[in-house]
Amino acid sequence: MALPLGLDIAMQHLIHRRRQTVVSLVGVALGVGFFIGIASMMQGFQRDFISRIIDIQPHIIVKDEFRTAPEQPVERLYAGAAIELRSLKPKEEIRGIRGARNLIEVLEKRPGTRVAPTLSSQILLRFGSKDVSANVTGIVPEQHRRVSTLEKDIISGALDGLSTTANGLIIGEGIANKAGIRVDDMVSVVSPMGVQMKMKVVGIFRSGLTLMDNFDTYALLKKAQVLANRPNVINRVNLRLDDVEQAAEVAAAIERQFGYRAESWQEQSRNVLGIFVIQNAIMYSTVGAILIVACFGIFNVISTVVFEKTRDIGILKSMGFRDADIRRIFVYEGLVVGIIGMLIGWGLGWGLVEFMASLEFHMEGFVRAEGFVLYRTPRHYLISGAMAIIASTSAAWLPARRASKLNPVDIVRGSA
């Protein structure tokens, strides 16, 4: 099947300058391939991190604190006046969520919402000669399993051990490894209030978040209240939603209704999510730089062809080729380089992703990893292909436009 005349001429021009054409193809292919590889790696990590945050932690946490300090009476009385308060002593209040029972009942009536009360405080865990500082969270197992994946994360023991054991305690794997603790071991727990209690380890969990594994422990809510010397008090209400994207909106509504600070998972992870934006900007900048370099190669090839084929352009115009026909020939050249480079880049990107998937390593940090977490999606191929074609076609447009404006009479006189 014969090619259209304009496309056939464009192909002959590219074949005639093989070396420059190959360099341009390599540039486009590298841009496409590296975009697919980097995007797969970065978005795989981002999605894995967000999924861990969403799965492990509550979607919303209502805390026993306020977002802003309460307004003083003098400030309310003389709003907008020039007032300076000095040596102001804050009112001493017992920490905890007031009217917690009513708050929980109201939240449980919200559709698609599961609620669990908790009390968090600091403890010193002592086992033999080892002392480990940790956080203890008092929970009600029947309610907590609805808002947390703690039961699924337990690698030794069981969540129900908190209810069947007199003073049960579940600890993170990092704590267990640091102190050499195993299930059924008895440990001494000391709170900042001076309360000391002998507790039995009934479970060890591994969440995948190093910070949690190294510092978090769980006990029955009543036991945590005894340790903190705060009977019948809770300082956290954890919520889990069916629609995680509604967390910020629901948290804002809860804060307006009850006044207590309500943090969505997006707010808790704001710093990390901000880093993801920077990562994506770096990714697009890097790939964009590679494609710009490739565009210069395409621009150079087509500009050289226009210079060398000036006489041929004059002949084509004298034969009846219009400006648009001449322009189309050279745009075809950029388009062909973009399409072929895109196809090669797709293969390169696929190979790069599969190579990274085969690498195995163990990394300890904020998140425990055993290798690259990759996100494979046709969207990366479509985006990279569109970028390659748009970039190569744009690079071909300027020399094509210049070629279309050549006057055949001037060309013939010049050659004469």
Image (cartoon, rainbow, N blue to C red):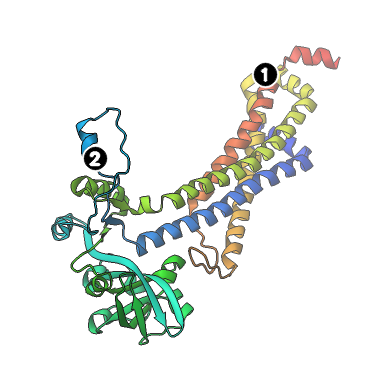
Asked whether the beta carbons under mark 2 and mark 1 sit within 8 Å of each other, the answer is: no
Camera-side residue of 325 and 46? 46
Residue 189 vs residue 280: left or right?
left
Q: Which residue is mark 2?
A: 72
Q: Position of residue 198 (x, y in %)?
A: 31, 83
Q: Position of residue 229 (x, y in %)?
A: 24, 70
Camera-side residue of 131 and 61? 131
Q: Identity of the amino acid at label 2?
A: Gln
SS at circle 1 = loop
Camera-side residue of 185 and 29? 185
Gap in angstroms between the C-alphas marked 2 and 1: 86 Å
Residue 281 vs residue 247: left or right?
right
Q: For residue 62, what is the image quadrant?
A: bottom left
Q: Identity of the amino acid at label 1?
A: Gly
What's the residue at 22%, 61% (across, down)? 114
Q: Quadrant of the C terminus?
A: top right
Q: Which residue is mark 1?
A: 320
Q: Quadrant of the N terminus?
A: top right
Observer-side mark, 2 or 1, equals: 2
Q: Position of residue 59 (x, y in %)?
A: 31, 57
